[in-house]
């Protein structure tokens, strides 16, 4: 961040700020994350950096969810989903759908806002027998599956269905272990411990 500001490399500011803001969110510095990510978002809009807007919106939406500001997060997630679909950013589209799911899971049943139900189109034609074939596609598919298992585990935990929560979190932990993803494996293991 210092280099971007000192050298006047403002074109790199949104990229660096988005990464740093996401890191702030992960370590619990949510207020700092929101401030930085808001600046990054404004910069992408002013400079018309369409390619950075979705990811910046998603990182800011994630921070807003952690701050309990679900309505604002919802608006950003929906905007990001529209951008990712328009620009065929499949990875960021998955991130937007995950964020929408997280927001829906945290929205109380008695909320005046309708639940978000978003059908996710498959990247492959129906009944085609197609599957990811490149190492990158296989890795992305496995990562998506493990994240989905962890997300379901968290959702079942919130709804009080402990056995199903434990089952999905155990699946996610095993998958993270197989993919050598210790950070996410530890998160899933901690969630299993919290069930006890």
Image: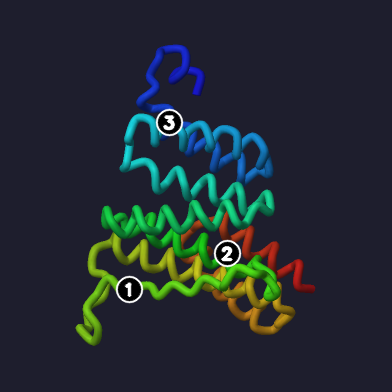
Image location (x, y in percent) of residue 114: 57, 72
Residues at circles 2 and 1 in contact by the CB criterion of under 8 Å = no
- Residue under pointer 2: 102
Dot 1 lies on which element?
A: loop
Q: Residue 11's image quarter?
A: top left
**Location of the C terminus (image quadrant):** bottom right
Ranked by sequence position, the earlier of labels 1 and 3 is: 3
Ranked by sequence position, the earlier of labels 2 and 1 is: 2
Badge number at residue 43: 3
Give the left or right position of residue 40, taking residue 150 as reference. Answer: left
82 vs 20: above or below = below
Image location (x, y in percent) of residue 181: 51, 57
Image location (x, y in percent) of residue 70: 62, 57
Give the left or right position of residue 95, taking residue 27 as reference. Answer: left
- How many angstroms separate mark 2 from mark 1 (CA)? 19 Å
Q: Residue 30's image quarter?
A: top right
Ranked by sequence position, the earlier of labels 2 and 3 is: 3
Give the left or right position of residue 115, taking residue 51 as reference. Answer: right
Badge number at residue 121: 1
Query: Dot 2: few (<14), some (14–19), or many (≥20) neighbours within 10 Å?
Result: some
Dot 3 lies on which element?
A: helix
Query: Dot 3: few (<14), some (14–19), or many (≥20) neighbours within 10 Å?
Result: some
| Front position in the image: 113 or 78 | 113
Dot 2 lies on which element?
A: helix
Q: Residue 49's image quarter?
A: top left
């Amino acid at each position: 961040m210092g280099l971007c500001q000192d050298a006047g490399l403002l074109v790199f500011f949104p990229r660096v700020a988005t990464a740093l803001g996401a890191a702030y969110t992960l370590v619990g510095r949510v207020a700092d994350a929101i401030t930085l990510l808001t600046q990054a978002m404004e910069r992408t809009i002013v400079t018309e950096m369409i390619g950075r807007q979705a990811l910046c919106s998603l990182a800011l939406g994630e921070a807003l969810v952690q701050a309990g500001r679900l309505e604002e997060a919802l608006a950003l997630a929906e905007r990001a989903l529209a951008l990712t679909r328009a620009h065929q950013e499949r990875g960021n589209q998955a991130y937007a759908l995950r964020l929408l799911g997280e927001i829906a899971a945290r929205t109380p049943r008695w909320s005046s806002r309708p639940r978000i139900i978003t059908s996710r189109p498959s990247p492959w034609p129906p009944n085609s027998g197609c599957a990811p074939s490149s190492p990158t596609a296989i890795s992305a598919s496995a990562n998506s599956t493990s994240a989905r298992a962890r997300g379901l585990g968290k959702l079942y935990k919130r709804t009080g269905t402990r056995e199903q929560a434990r089952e999905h979190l155990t699946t996610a932990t095993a998958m993270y272990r197989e993919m050598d993803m210790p950070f996410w494996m530890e998160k899933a293991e901690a969630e299993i411990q919290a069930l006890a």
